[in-house]
Image (tube, rainbow, N blue to C red):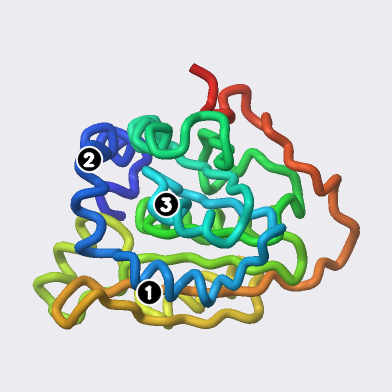
Amino acid sequence: MGILEDKDNARLFYRYFSRVYDTINPYIWDDGMRNQALEWFDADRDDRVLDVGAGTGFATEGLLNHVDEVYALDQSRGQFEQAFRKFGKHGKVRFHMGDAERLPFKDDSFDKLWSSGSIEYWPDPVAALREFRRVVKPGGTVLVVGPDYPKLRVFQKLADAIMLFYDAEEAEEMFREAGFEETRHFIQQRHRGSPRAITSVATVPESDGPSDDPGVEADRDADSDANDD
């Protein structure tokens, strides 16, 4: 397990990295890559969408070009402080502090779920993907963007020491273990020689039984709502 797959380490890291995140991020995950992923996501204007690991809101900005409202979840207050400056605390983005492996929402709460630049920090990716399947309605879309495993051995050793990197075969295995049956995997890259992203687009399978109330449960945990001062 990489050092940043520990949640306490990740929170500490983003307390400081959040200040420069929006400056550095475009060199790794830029508008063009985000817009291509949004085409695969294919959200309708009235879809209820959850952005997991929303951070400073780079993906959220793109999602708001396609939907009227976004539920944004992150475990880093530092990242959300940057997002508050962009969107305000009470507007089209509804902020929730929370954990990808224990989402503070009821079953079938969302039509679609997006998560970019977050999976690499999850100690248990399969548990998080199971949560995604739980909170998204049957037939809904789950899109996850993470770092593709480096090809050179020297970078592989560095990657393994820091956080989760994985290839398409490993991505397929994780989604299958989490209960997804239809998943496509795409490799994205800003330009030749830059870090590669792997974008997985999955469909939530039909449920075997009735689900809970489809309304959003805002408070599984008492501190789940990040809008509170």
Instruction: Tell me which corner region of the image, top left, top right, bottom left or bottom right, holds residue 79.
Output: top left
Viewer-proximal residue among 185 and 28: 28
Disc ID at residue 122: 3
Q: Nearer the viewer, residue 170 or 53?
A: 53
Q: Which residue is mark 2?
A: 17
Image-quadrant location for residue 96: top right
Secondary structure state at the residue bearing disc 1:
strand
Q: CA distance from mark 2 to mark 1?
A: 23 Å
The residue closer to the viewer here, 186 or 25, is 25
Any mark on residue 198, and which?
1
The single residue placed furthest to the top in the displayed view is 229
Secondary element under disc 2, as helix, strand or loop, is helix
Residue type at the position of mark 1: Ile
Q: Residue at x 50, y 76 (%)?
A: 173
Q: Secondary structure at mark 3?
A: loop
x, y percent for residue 198: 38, 74
Decide: few, some or many residues near mark 3? Use Cα within 10 Å; few <14, some 14-19, many ≥20: many
Q: Residue at x 44, y 37 (%)?
A: 75
Vertical relation: 121 (above or below) 156: above
